[in-house]
Image (cartoon, rainbow, N blue to C red):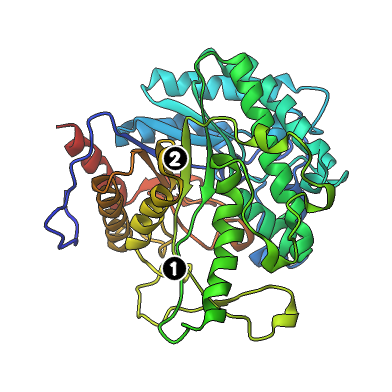
Amino acid sequence: MTTSSTDATWPPRLPADFTWGVSTAAYQIEGAADEDGKGASIWDTFVRRPGAVRDGHTGDVACDHYHRFDEDIALMGRLGLDAYRFSLSWPRIVPTGAGKVEPRGLDFYDRLVDALLDAGIEPTPTLFHWDLPQSLEDQGGWLNRDTAEHFAQYAAVVAERLGDRVKRWITLNEPFVHMSFGYGFGVHAPGRALLLDALPAAHHQLLGHGLATAALRNTVPGAQILISNNCTPVRLRSDARSDEDSAAASAYDALHNRLFNDPLLLGSYPDLSAYGMPDPSWAGVVRDGDLATIAAPLDGLGVNYYNPTWITAPADPAAGLPFDLAEPEEPYERTAFGWPVVPDGLTAVLTGLKARYGDALPPVWITENGCSQPAGLQDQARIDYLSGHITALARAMAQGVDVRGYFTWSLLDNFEWAEGYHQRFGLVEVDFATQQRTPRASFAWYRDLIAAQRS
């Protein structure tokens, strides 16, 4: 196993029961967009909006995982994975989001789970990774409190079918990103640009998590339940040190990190007065008993990390947000997506969670971490990225953070949301014209790392 890392601690020795995995998401890989009774999702609708997705790409076929999952599980077996994090397509199972269940959708996930178990790989499904049934969006989507109730009903349906074999569950993926990109700025489905009026989508997603947690526990004895939050360390440039800059950073941290972690772990929302919301009831959105439902004990917190966020005071305070996004002044290496490569940000996220939540912090799972790099099989930059971030999580563990597993994003090149097929995150290169899968150098590197950890 080779890496360009010069860190003398490489490779870090992690506990023998540490879980190594990969992550994917249904709309990004499955294809079969209208097969076997599947209903339309908000992404099926959004990709047909002119200009919404680069070059008009869609997820109609994607990686054709729906028909090729056996081939993909064989690749996972070659990696020697402990677990596979995937998402279930809500509209594939409940086509209109509520009511009639499509048995063929459940049959597909039955086959997938059985094939994973036959390969010795633990299935770790995520119930919602952004592909809301379009029928529910037509009724308001996550701005409508009823969606949280429908989500819990869907969770119960899935748990009843798969719960005899699936023990680790993730409710939501990155509710901050779905709220902000989908409802706040409109760059993701459903494409609504509501700015701060998107905040009810935060509460209703979290309420859906709490209600789904209860449904899972009622159906699956001993279920392990997580939620995956996108976490970012909030940083100031060296030339941005005024009280106004610090207040802007605190406001952004409240919106991106604490809005989605405090209710889960502390049972309360952070101060949102910077957003004109001093009333914690959010004008009736948050009802009595909601926070107790949201704060039901977790078995783990999923952390998705990609990079820090730099913040300054707003140049125009009247523009509506109490912060401006900034570029770092340091000359960081960049991924093909343009994101700065900052491994120590992962250490900062993990130790920061421990400092803020203390004993309330459950075991942590890194449920996404990876990078887009140019097409090609020799992807040393991805190897360097992964080695740096795995070293960073090992440093956090050495400082007392209980991290149980690491799922890299992603197994396959896939449909990367508004970027279509232009960003490649896979350990495996996919030729989307032929669906040929070819492992990259990073695939062999990750395989060897896992083997070395077990030796």
In the image, taking residue 5 as reference, residue 61 lies left or right, namely right
Q: Position of residue 89 (x, y in %)?
A: 65, 35
- Kind of residue at badge 2: Leu
Does 436 sit above or below residue 388? above
Q: Earlier in the sequence, mark 1 or mark 2?
A: 1
Residue 59 is left or right of residue 169, and the answer is right
Position of 75 with respect to 158 (left or right) is left
Residue topped by disc 1: 336
User: Residue at left 41%, top 62%?
Assistant: 375
Residue 312 location, x and y as percent? Answer: 54, 79
> Where residue 361 is drawn, which disc sits there?
2
**Camera-nearest residue between 153 and 50:** 153
Q: Quadrant of residue 33?
A: top right
Q: Are marks 1 and 2 in contact (CB under 8 Å)?
A: no
Q: Residue at x 20, y 37 (%)?
A: 453
For label 1, the SS is loop
Residue at image position (82%, 22%) is 100
Q: Toward the viewer: 435 or 439?
A: 439
Q: Nearer the viewer, residue 212 or 48?
A: 212
Q: Quadrant of residue 358?
A: top left
> Residue type at mark 1?
Ala
Residue at image point 83% right, 52% down: 283
Q: In screen coordinates, is 152 left or right of 307?
A: right
Looking at this rendering, what residue extends furthest in the right direction? 139
